[in-house]
């Protein structure tokens, strides 16, 4: 087996495991050789090797055999020029061998090999992050943390839907910190990785090592923290790790798909601690931001595709049609690049619609009740929790009824379904709210204008 064949197999695995799992676990694998039926892969850390061996070895083995590779077992190991001694109470992390500088290692590039982090994506830097109104506060906060000055808000909590830039900002912070301060111990990993590292330590009776590793870092960055909700033992250890680092004035950066107080099954004490710093929402992208992202993506790809021609209106068309997920938007553009290069055609609207027909169908605007609630809450400057909560103050009841009305008008959900999304309210309550807004719109032009503005922004 050669690198070209392994590259094709990795592409197949990406389709099976999904982009996030591929980036974290499959992409770091480097084929090192095949000997007597054993395929050896180099991994950046033992942790990644153990995880891939337990969870993906059968899948990888099956793909290799399907490709005609005479393999019976897999071996995941560190490169020979790197060793990864197991840290202990008598051997602090700082004594571990230091990786080559500026590499995207598991610990973010500036820590020690013993740090149990995830690889950083070299593409996710601040200079490649397109800033617009929906994400400008999150970007500014991330830049402040990345400056590595005195901790001013701890933790920095970034939240928002899929494909809005949370992971990009997390990686950018880690890159910037490790580039600014050589030797800074920065750990970036997902909450899922934190949990499995914790479980592994329990199984191997190495909890003291685990505690020492995580509580002696300079910056801890945990992505998708909602994953540990409902996992009591992991939450307990996370809580104590969090407190230990805050007490040492060490910076913590957290991301999630929703605000701390909206994560179900998250312990109240953890939710409270997560809110004690700066909580920043990354809003859904608007048209201008999506267009800017596409334009920057084109500029970044000019070296790889120097002869590529993109007709007027193509980027604007994509920015308008694919509005729910930036990852899907970028993936669509990359598919266009590849297709146009292979067939030798100009990228025009006809080719775009032909090549991306499946993505365009799947991306037809589907407005969710949660998006309506969030947008109405922002418009009327109330908390999302009050939107679905029991309080009946007029200042809360009217925006709630507006959201009910828009949910009825802009989604296909039934009244009982809408009621469940509004704190399990009865369908008659929803119907009353819808009729009330219809009556008020006929009398109050300001309310009618507000609702029309909200409708346009949701349908944009």
Image (cartoon, rainbow, N blue to C red):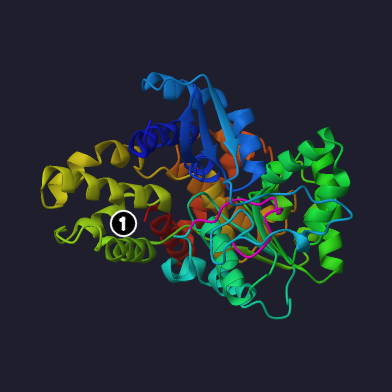
Residue 301 lies left or right of residue 203; in this view the side is left
Between 1 and 10, the residue placed more toward the observer is 1
Q: Which corner quadrant of the image does residue 449 belong to?
A: bottom left
- What is the crowding at mark 1: few (fewer than 14 residues within 10 Å), some, or many (at least 20)? many
Q: Which residue is mark 1?
A: 319
Between 317 and 369, the residue placed more toward the observer is 317
What residue lies at 58% left-to-right and 46% top-to-bottom?
Answer: 80
Does residue 114 show up magenta in the picture? yes
Q: Is residue 227 visible?
A: yes
Quadrant placement of the N terminus? top left
Does residue 19 show up magenta in the picture? no
Q: Position of residue 224 (x, y in %)?
A: 63, 49
Q: Is residue 314 above or below residue 126?
A: above
Q: Is residue 269 visible?
A: no
Report the span colored magenta.
109-121
Residue 220 lies left or right of residue 205; in this view the side is left
What residue lies at 23% left-to-right and 46% top-to-bottom?
Answer: 338
Q: Position of residue 380 (x, y in %)?
A: 58, 65
Q: Is residue 99 above or below residue 404?
A: below
What residue lies at 49% left-to-right and 21% top-to-bottom?
Answer: 37
Between 326 and 43, the residue placed more toward the observer is 43
* Secondary structure of the residue carrying numbered label 1: helix
Q: Position of residue 251 (x, y in %)?
A: 73, 68
Residue 327 lies left or right of residue 296; in this view the side is right
Residue 459 lies left or right of residue 78; in this view the side is left
Quadrant placement of the C terminus? bottom left
Q: Which corner quadrant of the image does residue 51 belong to?
A: top right
What residue lies at 33% left-to-right and 66% top-to-bottom?
Answer: 296
Q: Magenta stretch: dominant SS? A: loop
The residue sitting at the bottom extreme is 149
């Amino acid at each position: 087996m050669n690198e070209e064949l392994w590259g094709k197999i990795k592409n197949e695995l990406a389709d099976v495991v999904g982009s996030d799992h591929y980036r974290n676990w499959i992409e770091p694998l480097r084929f090192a050789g095949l000997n007597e039926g054993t395929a050896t892969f180099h991994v950046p850390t033992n942790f990644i090797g153990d995880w891939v061996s337990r969870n993906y070895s059968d899948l990888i083995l099956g793909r290799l055999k399907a490709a005609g590779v005479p393999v019976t077992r897999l071996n995941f190991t560190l490169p020979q020029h790197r060793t990864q001694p197991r840290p202990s109470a008598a051997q602090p992390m700082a004594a571990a061998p230091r990786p080559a500088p500026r590499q995207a290692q598991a610990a973010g590039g500036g820590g020690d090999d013993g740090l149990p982090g995830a690889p950083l994506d070299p593409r996710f830097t601040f200079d490649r992050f397109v800033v617009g109104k929906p994400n400008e506060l999150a970007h500014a906060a991330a830049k402040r943390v990345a400056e590595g000055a005195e901790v001013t808000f701890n933790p920095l909590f970034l939240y928002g839907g899929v494909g809005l830039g949370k992971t990009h900002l997390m990686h950018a912070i880690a890159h910037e910190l490790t580039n600014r301060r050589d030797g800074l111990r920065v750990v970036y990993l997902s909450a899922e990785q934190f949990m499995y590292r914790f479980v592994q330590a329990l199984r191997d009776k190495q909890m003291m090592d685990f505690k020492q590793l995580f509580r002696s870092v300079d910056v801890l960055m945990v992505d998708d923290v909602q994953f540990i909700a409902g996992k009591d033992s992991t939450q307990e250890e996370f809580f104590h790790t969090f407190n230990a680092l805050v007490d040492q004035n060490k910076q913590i950066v957290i991301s999630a798909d929703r605000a701390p107080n909206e994560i179900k099954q998250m312990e109240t004490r953890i939710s409270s601690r997560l809110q004690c710093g700066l909580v920043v929402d990354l809003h859904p992208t608007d048209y201008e931001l999506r267009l800017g992202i596409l334009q920057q993506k084109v500029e970044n790809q000019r070296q790889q595709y120097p002869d590529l021609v993109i007709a007027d209106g193509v980027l604007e068309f994509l920015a308008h049609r694919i509005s729910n997920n930036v990852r899907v938007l970028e993936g669509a553009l990359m598919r266009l690049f590849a297709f146009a290069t292979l067939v030798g055609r100009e990228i025009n609207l006809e080719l775009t619609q032909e090549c991306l027909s499946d993505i365009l169908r799947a991306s037809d605007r589907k407005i969710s009740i949660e998006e309506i609630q969030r947008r109405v809450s922002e418009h009327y400057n109330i908390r999302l929790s009050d939107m679905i909560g029991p309080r009946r103050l007029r200042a809360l009841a009217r925006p709630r009824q507006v959201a009910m009305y828009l949910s009825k008008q802009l989604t296909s959900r039934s009244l009982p379904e809408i009621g469940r999304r509004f704190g399990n309210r009865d369908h008659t309550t929803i119907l009353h709210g819808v009729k009330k807004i219809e009556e008020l719109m006929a009398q109050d032009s300001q309310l009618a204008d507000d609702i029309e503005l909200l409708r346009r922004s949701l349908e944009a």
